[in-house]
Amino acid sequence: MSANGSAAREELAGFAAARARTLALVAGVPQAELDRARLSWTGRRRWTPGEILDHLVLSEKFYRGELGTLVRLARSGRPAEIVRSFSDLDISVLFIPRAVLALFALPLTLASLALPAPLQDFAARSRLVPAQNPTATTPRRGRPGEELRADLAASLAATEALFAANDDLDFTRMVYQHPLLGRRNVPEMLRFLALHEQRHHEQLTIALGAPDPGGEKRPDRAAERRCS
């Protein structure tokens, strides 16, 4: 990439590293384990490992589409800025039902704009901050493991190709405003994608119950119940 793309290159490498760890976590995992569902301490069904993987594929596809729109805006000479609302993304946060979110949308959006970047990153990475995913990233059940692993690799390649094909652009000047993430340029959005992937590493670690290739020991079942 050009000098203007150095920040994007760095964050893209971080996202690629997160994806490599995802693939390492599920390498050789049998289909039965990928399809095994667990219940939270409240009795709510949690995503299976396979559904977590599909969610990651769909999330990257969704945000790659948004980043592609920013690139097209920049190429056309128009302001490269996208502003999304809660209703645009069909998301929620904490334990606020989507049906009543409109009552809280403005103060939550203003709070996200005022939140310092390190706290925004913590919210993206930590499962201590519950959020409801966009409808477009809701995973499909029962997808074959080999297909999921192939899609994860292909999706990363498509994202890398988007940046390689536009390495003459200044990605730091493209802005994406998210109702929970605040205003972020493209490198910062890539950092969010990496943090989001890391957030789901913890879920995969708990659900699969085997040593983590990233070096972290997976919690035992008692710890799992405490974390659920």
Image (cartoon, helix red, strand yellow):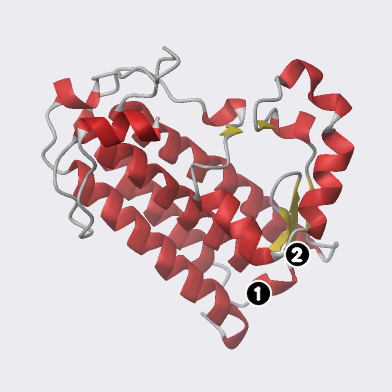
* Residue farthest to the bottom, as pictured: 3
Across and down, in percent, residue 66 comes to: 65, 48
Q: Are marks 1 and 2 in contact (CB under 8 Å)?
A: yes
Residue found 46% across the figure and 57% down from its top: 194
In the image, 152 versus 114, the foreground residue is 114
Disc 1 marks which amino acid?
A: Leu
Nearer-N-terminus badge (1/2): 2
Image quarter for residue 167? bottom right
Residue found 71% across the figure and 45% down from its top: 180
Across and down, in percent, residue 216 comes to: 23, 55
Residue found 72% across the figure and 64% down from its top: 116
Across and down, in percent, residue 91 comes to: 67, 30
Q: Secondary structure at mark 1?
A: loop
The residue to which callout 2 is attached is: 74
Please say whether residue 164 is visible from this viewpoint.
Answer: no
Using the image, tell me which numbered label, if any, was put on residue 169. 1
Disc 2 marks which amino acid?
A: Ala
Along the horizontal axis of the image, is 152 left or right of 139? Answer: left
Using the numbered discs, state the Cα–Cα distance from disc 1 to disc 2 in whole angstroms. 8 Å
Q: Residues within 10 Å of mark 2 (few under 14, many from 20)?
A: some
* Residue farthest to the top, as pictured: 43
Q: Secondary structure at mark 2?
A: helix
